[in-house]
Amino acid sequence: MNIADLPNFGSKSQQMLAQAGIHTIAQLRKLGAVRAYVQVKQSGVNASLKLLWAMEGALSNRHWQDVVKNDRLRLLLELEDAENDFKR
């Protein structure tokens, strides 16, 4: 199984992850959605928050819209913390 087999990912999402050096499901799981999203952004990719929702959904086997509905605030707070950690 590879990243293309996960739910929520189209070819554009896969390209964004690859550009950030994330090529396997194991790498994505190890990073988690928030850290993977930060890594994608740091690679220069102009990714929207939909990528964060898609990654979280893929890792938890849910549709990205379910993630937005139920986990949006938690993920945004985690993202803020991760971005602040990177700036230090």
Image (cartoon, rainbow, N blue to C red):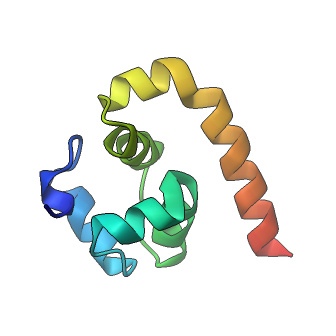
- Residue 9 position within the rendered picture, expressed as x and y whole percent measured from the top left: 21, 49
Would you say 38 lies left or right of 77 here?
left
Q: Residue at x 47, y 44 (%)?
A: 49
Q: Outermost residue, top direction?
A: 69
Where is 63 relative to 30, above or below? above
Q: Residue at x 49, y 53 (%)?
A: 33
Q: Quadrant of residue 66?
A: top left
Q: Quadrant of the N terminus?
A: bottom left
Q: Residue at x 26, y 57 (%)?
A: 13
Asked whether 47 or 24 is in front, the reply is 24
Where is 66 relative to 62, above or below? above
Asked whether 60 or 73 is in front, the reply is 60
Q: Residue at x 65, y 40 (%)?
A: 76
Would you say 2 lies left or right of 33 here?
left
Would you say 66 lies left or right of 35 here?
left
Q: Quadrant of the C terminus?
A: bottom right
Where is 12 relative to 66, above or below? below
- Residue 55 position within the rendered picture, expressed as x and y whole percent measured from the top left: 38, 48
Q: Outermost residue, right direction?
A: 88
**What count of labels does the image hold?**
0
Asked whether 61 or 67 is in front, the reply is 61
Would you say 46 lies left or right of 61 here?
right
Q: Quadrant of residue 58?
A: top left
